[in-house]
Image (cartoon, rainbow, N blue to C red):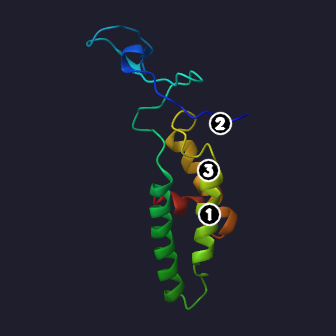
Amino acid sequence: MARCEHCDAPLSDSDWHPKKDGKKGTDKDSVAQRRPHCVKCGMVRNISSNAAKGTGFYTNVLSEIRERVNVQSKRTGGVVAKFTTSQMRLIVKELEEDEEFEDKYIHDKLAQQERFIEAVRKYRPDLRPEFIREFL
């Protein structure tokens, strides 16, 4: 399946979608809200606080993880392996090659976080998922 280059419909053409309680309405006081959708494929974009983040966000998280791991490596005298620049590059490259990783129409933040953890553990299986989640 080819990736859609999403294009938001104008706000005036956006559809009303129910909020979490499932009720519908069409005015400001209602429990519904307008959600932008793609005019090409029809998918609705996630506009909640659980929306997907950009690859740059995860690159910064990866830098924080690397810094913490390298401090631990120094403290333990090399018992904990250093987080190398090449490992970091491979993880970022894998995320960038995943066309759907930054797609706010397909992924929410939780699915994106799981994909990030999977990519980190591919190159650093010694890092527990709970440890990685501390930085997210």
Query: Residue 60 at what x, y percent from top left?
Result: 45, 63
Under circle 1, the secondary element is helix
Q: Which structural element holds mark 2?
A: loop
Of callouts 1 and 3, which one flags the residue occurring earlier in the amino acid sequence?
Answer: 1
Q: Which of 85 and 81 is in front in this view?
A: 85
Q: In this view, does 3 lie to the left or right of 13?
A: right
Residue in the picture at 50% in, 43% down: 109
The residue to which callout 1 is attached is 91
Residue at numbered disc 3: 115
Nearest-to-viewer mark from 1 and 3: 1
Question: Is residue 31 left or right of 113 when viewed as pictured?
Answer: left
Q: Which amino acid does label 2 sit on?
A: Arg
Q: Nearest to the eye among marks 2 and 3: give it.
A: 2
Checking the image for residue 3, the label placed there is: 2
- Of marks 2 and 1, which one's residue comes earlier in the chain? 2
Seen as rendered, the residue at the extreme bottom is 77
* Amino acid carrying mark 1 in the image: Ile
Q: Note whether 52 is above or below 27 in the view shown.
A: below
